[in-house]
Image (cartoon, helix red, strand yellow):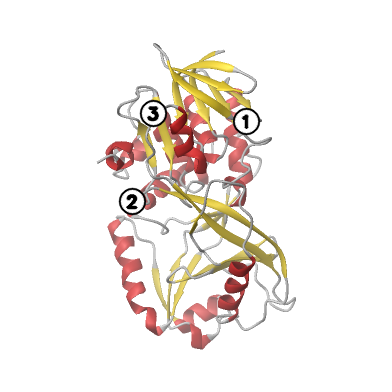
């Protein structure tokens, strides 16, 4: 099989690149697992949060907003976004965090944060303990995001444009050829002009198969769980609530509450499992700010967030390996930035101009290039 672009990794990162690249190229998407989106994509907190992350992430999130708000016809059967809001809360000892959050928002060039008093925060979430909340920041533009619909929309659209998706196809070897790359799996051998490394937690390992030095991309475990609020407590209209120093968060999820310690624990790339101690610690911290007990954890899981040394994503060609394209290190922001990151990568891979929606946010290719991590 000979293709223009071979994408390694069938999560949101790889699927979004396939969707945009397949318009102008012959694309194949390889996924090592039996189905796509098994690792980080399928374990997301599912929120579009324009005021979350670094200044670069916020610009990419803003660039993704138009697509998520009004996707192309037939992309999804229902809206991808639903009103939620994002409430950051802090105690009197966390006033420094208030200023830091506002400073990062200003640096992104498009702040939508509203400063609230503790009393105003408790009016939004009546179960908050007044003594635990001295101040708050509300981003009313944050919205719930249908992750599965977004992923399937990218995959369905990529297939409609001629792309092929092969699951259970872990890459075992990458070899440079005169015209690109030879890619081997247990079942197939194919040749591609461009290889896209969208392997998530396995991105550095995938690069090693091609004889390329790692970028220092490290997977980090994050544990989440589901619990119930008392039947007498109406939670449907609550915003997502996060501690000012990301010591925990919780949000409504299908009639229940999703909680997390918001931890970042470096781990080897693997099918990670939840840590009971982290769940218990998160429960304790959440109970310190709400006025009801968490009586039972109904379900828990863990996912991976992959960060490079500067914690911003990597999307660009490897300088010393023509045709090898990095698209990784998306941290916890790969879902909310997916349309922008996918369109950015497709433009770079196909040597086309960056879309205006990305240029207008001030995102430059050099900010995402792997070369910045080689210095």
Residue 223 in the image: above or below residue 118: above
Q: How many marks?
A: 3
Q: Secondary structure at mark 1?
A: helix
The residue located at (58%, 19%) in the rendering is: 162
| Marking on residue 310 | 2
Q: Give the spatial CA distance, label 1 vs label 3.
A: 20 Å
Q: Nearer the viewer, residue 31 or 254?
A: 31
Left/right of residue 227 with respect to residue 30 in the rendered view: right
**Residue 79 visible at all:** no
| Marking on residue 202 | none
Q: Give the spatial CA distance, label 2 vs label 1.
A: 34 Å
Question: For mark 3, what is the residue?
Answer: 347
Q: Secondary structure at mark 3?
A: helix
The residue located at (48%, 42%) in the rendering is: 338
- Dot 2: within a 10 Å radius of its alpha carbon, few (fewer than 14), some, or many (20 or more) residues? few
| Marking on residue 156 | 1
Q: Quadrant of residue 353?
A: top left
- Dot 1: within a 10 Å radius of its alpha carbon, few (fewer than 14), some, or many (20 or more) residues? some
């Amino acid at each position: 099989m000979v293709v223009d672009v071979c994408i390694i990794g069938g999560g949101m990162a790889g699927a979004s690149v396939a969707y945009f690249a397949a318009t102008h190229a012959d694309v194949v998407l390889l996924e090592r697992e039996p189905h796509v989106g098994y690792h980080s994509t399928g374990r997301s907190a599912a929120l579009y949060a324009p005021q979350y992350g670094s200044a670069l992430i916020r610009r990419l999130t803003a660039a993704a907003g138009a697509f998520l708000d009004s996707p192309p016809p037939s992309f999804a059967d229902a809206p991808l976004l639903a009103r939620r809001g994002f409430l950051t809360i802090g105690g009197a000892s966390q006033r420094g965090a208030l200023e830091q959050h506002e400073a990062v928002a200003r640096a992104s060039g498009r702040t939508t944060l509203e400063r609230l008093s503790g009393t105003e925060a408790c009016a939004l979430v009546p179960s908050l303990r007044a003594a635990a909340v001295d101040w708050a920041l509300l981003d009313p533009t944050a919205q719930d995001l249908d992750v599965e619909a977004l992923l399937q929309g990218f995959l369905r659209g990529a297939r409609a444009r001629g792309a092929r998706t092969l699951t259970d196809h872990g890459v075992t070897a990458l070899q440079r050829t005169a015209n690109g790359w030879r890619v081997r799996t247990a079942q197939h051998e194919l040749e591609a002009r461009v290889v896209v490394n969208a392997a998530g937690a396995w991105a550095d390992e995938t690069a090693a198969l091609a004889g390329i030095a790692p970028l220092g991309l490290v997977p980090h475990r994050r544990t989440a769980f589901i619990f119930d609020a008392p039947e007498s407590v109406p939670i449907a209209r609550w915003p997502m609530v996060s501690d000012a120093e990301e010591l925990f968060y919780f949000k409504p999820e299908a009639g229940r509450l999703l909680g997390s310690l918001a931890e970042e624990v470096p781990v080897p790339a693997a099918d990670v499992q939840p840590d009971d101690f982290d769940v218990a610690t998160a429960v304790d911290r959440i109970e310190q700010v709400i006025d009801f007990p968490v009586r039972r954890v109904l379900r828990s899981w863990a996912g991976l967030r992959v960060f490079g040394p500067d914690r911003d994503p990597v999307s660009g060609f490897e300088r010393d390996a023509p045709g090898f394209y990095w698209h990784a290190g998306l941290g916890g922001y790969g879902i909310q930035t997916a349309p922008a990151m996918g369109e950015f990568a497709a433009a770079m891979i196909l040597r086309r101009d960056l879309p205006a929606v990305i240029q207008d946010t001030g995102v430059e290719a050099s900010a995402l290039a792997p070369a910045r991590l080689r210095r």
